[in-house]
Amino acid sequence: MNARWSARGLAVLGAVALAVPLTAAPATAAPTVASAPAETLTTLDHLDFLLDEATPPADVAGHSTYRQAEEPTLLAPWTYADARDGGTFQRVGGGPLDPATGDWGQGAYNADDNTRAAVVYLRHWEQTGDADSRQKAYELLRTVAYHQTTEGPSAGNVVLWMQPDGDLNPSAEPIELPDPSDSGPSYWTARTVWALGEGYAAFSDDDPDFAAFLKDRLALSRGAIERDVLSRYGQYAEADGKKVPAWLIVDGADATAEAVLGLAAAVEAGDDSSATAARQLAEGVAAMASGSTRQWPYGAVLPWAQSPAMWHAWGSQMPAALAVAGDLFDDDALVEPAIADATGFTTTLLTAGGPDNGWYPSPTDRVQIAYGADSRVQSLLALADTTGSAAFAELAGLQAAWFFGANHAGARMYDPATGVTFDGLQPDGTVNRNSGAESTIHGLLTALALDAHPEVAARATALTSVESRVGLEYVEAEDAVRTDGTVFTPESSWTGEASWSGEGLTLTTRRSATWDIGDSDTRRWVEPVVRTAPGEKSQSAWHGGGLLSVTGPEQGISPTPGALLPYALTAPVSGSDVRVDVVRGDLTLDGLIVRPWISRLVLGGDGRGELVHSSAIAPQRTTIGAEGVDTTVNVYDDAGSRLRTISTTGVVSVVLPAGGFAIAEG
């Protein structure tokens, strides 16, 4: 439930802290049911174990569900599951447990996990015809609808938390914003739209009466979005000098993307009334594309309109939503930003270390969780389905291998025998072996996607180790080997819209600093991460990198004045030393992003996979493959179009186009 925060000031804390579930007293202790590995990767045992029943009061104003009088009991997954000895887990809620009442500070169940669990069972039912999954999808969708507020000024919004006895808890402890949770647009409203849209599509032929109910409830939450969000359609704001759309749910392209997935599914199934909202929200997501081949964030679709300095892996299904909407509406303008995200940013992310929780803008939060890894897989496979390009399927195989051991811990994060997905991977390689609802759900969503793409699944499960990486690195400003500047410690690492990576370095006029960035066999781009106040100016000379002039942008809608942003130097760096001399003003640095012209990732196991990616602005020659290994190499341009295929044994020389990449399978 990492991404339930709608106030992005809590984004860093939420992503990190909730990768480690809360350790309040257990609600139930039981082992997961282990089953023998099957040919398919999807095993629902652990998610089944997380499910429990609650019977809410029958007369709660503004809250009801389908056939509540006849079927008063609801189904929902417990939020967390703490690991215990012997491979067992204890189901727990969020926040402290009150022994007298049985209530949790937050609750036992939440709308975010109910909605996404419903999507898991819906997709499993649709892929396999499994009757049990159909029934659980039906029950979970009834619970999703109960969380909706059906009347009053908050109609269509959603209460997040539910206690074990079925009581809704709109004011959780610790406090979450908005509070109460149905007071405005939220992630959980967006995810409710996702589940209801996919539910309507799945049940439209199977159970028309239930589908009609789901369509009505989809219209209810869509109406709230139209009222509170799309009333600003076509309007723009500025955040730290960047033009951003004003019609995103909680200013989030991430939340909005998940709503688009549900709306698009409903439109595809015949709900024409959802088409306008789907298109307009998708246009807002597309407007968050940023950067270029050589400049941060390298074509990524950013998640939060209030900060041009933030990208996070969790909830990063923006390219998936754009691919699906672009296909639905036959609109290349929606698909193109998704392609740029995959070819420019995702390749950078893979070679830099994988699906880090957050680059804010430096790789500050290097915890990795299933939600982040799955979001990347979903986006790549959606692009593969929409474009027909093998490039995105091949990249999806490399990314999905994270679940099977191709990560910096060499640890399997998803177990196909039990359906357990571990809650997190720490930067030091420690695995958080708890397995709560969010991690379980997103591990299963990847498993389902791989089962639907068996060639990708075969590749992902064969690649179980990271053999080598050469990619984006970060050098702390305070690690200068020579400087007459001043090292300082920020009052808080979190600025409200970005995050300091550690200490900072201030250089006044005529002060200098030199960093050792190590040797490399390729040229590198260097992007100083600079903190400026609005209107503040500095000019600095970077030896070999050109002159950098920075003016602090106006605040706009960003939470705090001042920005912490990377600035691309005008020329690449070819040596191991980087030196700066301040010509005018004060230069305040967090660090240096160092990105090689040729980045590389090599995965091993029962096969071999290699990705080489160019960030250069002209064609570059490099090598790919390994001695004695039979290899098929595909070379792609920056749009994912295949330029050539080479079958070879050993190492081969290839020319990568500007921003292009090659993938070798052996």
Image (cartoon, helix red, strand yellow):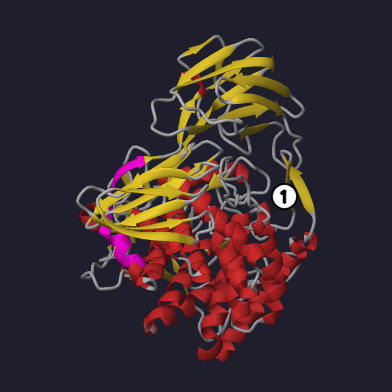
Q: Position of residue 415 (x, y in %)?
A: 28, 61
Q: Nearer the viewer, residue 19 or 166?
A: 19
One can see residue 79 in this view:
no
Q: Tell me which residue sits at (43%, 54%) in the image.
A: 373
| Mark 1 crowdedness (10 Å alpha carbons): few <14, some 14-19, many ≥20 | many
Residue bearing mark 1: 244
Q: Quadrant of the C terminus?
A: bottom left
- Residue 52, image x, y percentages: 41, 69
Q: Position of residue 334 (x, y in %)?
A: 64, 63
Magenta residue check for 208: no
Quarter of the figure with residue 401:
bottom left
Residue type of the residue flagged with mark 1: Val
Tell me the residue at 63%/52% (across/down): 289
Q: Position of residue 501 (x, y in %)?
A: 51, 30
Q: Quadrant of residue 153?
A: bottom right
Where 75 falls versus 519 (above or below)?
below
What residue do we see at 50% from left, 67% from top? 382
Q: Is residue 343 visible?
A: yes
Quarter assignment of residue 370: bottom left
Q: Is residue 521 above or below residue 420?
A: above
Q: Is residue 619 above or below residue 164?
A: above
160 horizontally vs 238: left or right: left
Quick check: is 459 in the magenta stretch?
A: yes
| Left or right of 492 on screen, residue 356 | left
Range of residues picked out in magenta: 456-469
Secondary structure under tag 1 reads strand
In the image: residue 378, left or right of residue 455: right
Q: How many marks?
A: 1
